[in-house]
Amino acid sequence: MRRLLLGLLIALPLAGVVAGAAGIKYAAIAGGQFRSALKYEDAPNGTRVKPFALMRMPVSNAQFLKFVERNPEWQHDKVSPVFAEQRYLSQWASATTLGDEARGDQPVTWVSWFAASAFCESIDARLPTWQEWEYVAASDETRRDARSDPAWRERILAWYSRPSSSALPRVGLQTPNVYGVQDMHGLVWEWTEDYSAMLVDGDNRKQGDADKAKFCGAGALSMDDRDNYAVLMRVAMLSSLSGADATANMGFRCARSAK
Amino acid sequence: MTRSTRNCLSTSRLLTLAMLLIAGFVFSAGVFAAGKTPPLPADSLYQLTLPLTDQAGKTADWRTRRGKPQLVAMFYTSCKFICPLIVDSGKAIERQLDAKQRQKLGILLISMDPKRDSPGALKHIVDTRKLDTSRWTLASPPQDDVRTVAGLLGIRYRLLADGEFNHSSALILLDANGRILARTEKMGTQPDPEFVAAVKQALR
């Protein structure tokens, strides 16, 4: 089945859509050279992102509910605390009921990295890498890389300055980007497969004075593009979390490799 | 009562007896199994299924290490700087223990680089560092499980373009059921006294 889907993905690049389980839709992402806003000392000229497919929208409460119905070990009252903290899915009325506080079309939040990974695995997918996420998030409605446009930055930053206490909008309200992907900005934070590759030193004063006992090798990451606050905040968030952590605004979407 | 009914009854009695026997067998088998391996505590890291291939090329789930406290760390064999220190750290902890205590502790070094850390590569470290494999195990998980086990152990890492890794280092002490008892990021030949105390406590 996976081969068939990937075959379709390659055979129908114009369609750009691959339907997955439970109404989950993917957009085909063409590969390309990419320079991260993060400073990677080992790859100063950027890296090549391979073609892949990314879910058009973040995973919704309804989709995650189906997952925990089929996989009871991921229900709030059954999950091991090593895989998800106490607040995991705490916005739901019960382990298998969404209730009034969590509508089906809202993005699922309060999910741990382990749970997000297990969800993606259950539909023969995986979490995107940070680089894949950042690559797609660099686009706007018409351009694959809109990052140098001050208007693009302003628009994204406006979301981060909004208080996070209000209820989350539903998924898919925003205009799709050039790939047909929605809600990369302005809805939720998102887990990446390699969240724990973020070796950012929390204390800026230590930058350039690598704490060698903590990070073996070439030291911690730093920002190459200091004006890209949106990316900076995402990285700071991911670097501060453990795999079992869950937060009110951390959701996810899945990806598939094109082989 | 007609003959046929009596036959029928005895048949049903036989069936009942057979069912009781089967139920009894299943029940006792259940008790036996439960006695052998009680369910894992919910907060055991062994909740994760993790097949590990060791320096001898033997693959076994890490749950087979249940029953003995474990000192766990992550490393990779081609690492030049911190990883030799991780072996030093394990040896330094062992030096704080007497012979009896040493036999009660398993030391497990899990590779973050399974693509290169074949049993041969792991064995090379075992040989050059003169590690006693009755206590030490160097092992590689499947590639797709590296980030997961690292997440459980609180280890962060990134593969660099030249094949080296940036990574955080820690020694983690697990109890006989795989629950985290203690953790230290102090590496080297001078072990963290609090951590050593926790190890000794676990081996009592």
Image: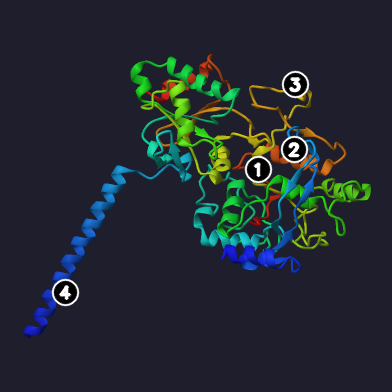
Q: Position of residue A181 (x, y in %)?
A: 77, 60
- The residue tagged 4 is B12
What is the secondary structure assignment of the residue under circle 1?
Answer: loop
Q: Position of residue A193 (x, y in %)?
A: 64, 46
Specify the quadrant that holds the C terminus of chain B: top left
Task: Pick whichever of labels 1 and 3 is earlier in the sequence.
Answer: 1
Q: In the rendered view, tell whether residue A149 sits above or below residue A235.
A: below
Whole-angstrom CA distance, mark 2 to mark 1, is 14 Å
Q: Chain of mark 2?
A: A
The residue located at (47%, 43%) in the rendering is: B50
Q: Position of residue A129 (x, y in %)?
A: 68, 47
Specify the quadrant that holds the N terminus of chain B: bottom left
Whole-angstrom CA distance, mark 1 to mark 3, is 24 Å
Task: Pick whichever of labels 2 and 1 is earlier in the sequence.
Answer: 1
- The residue tagged 1 is A194
Q: Amino acid at mark 2?
A: Ala
**Residue A236, label in figure:** 2
Task: Pick whichever of labels 2 and 3 is earlier in the sequence.
Answer: 3
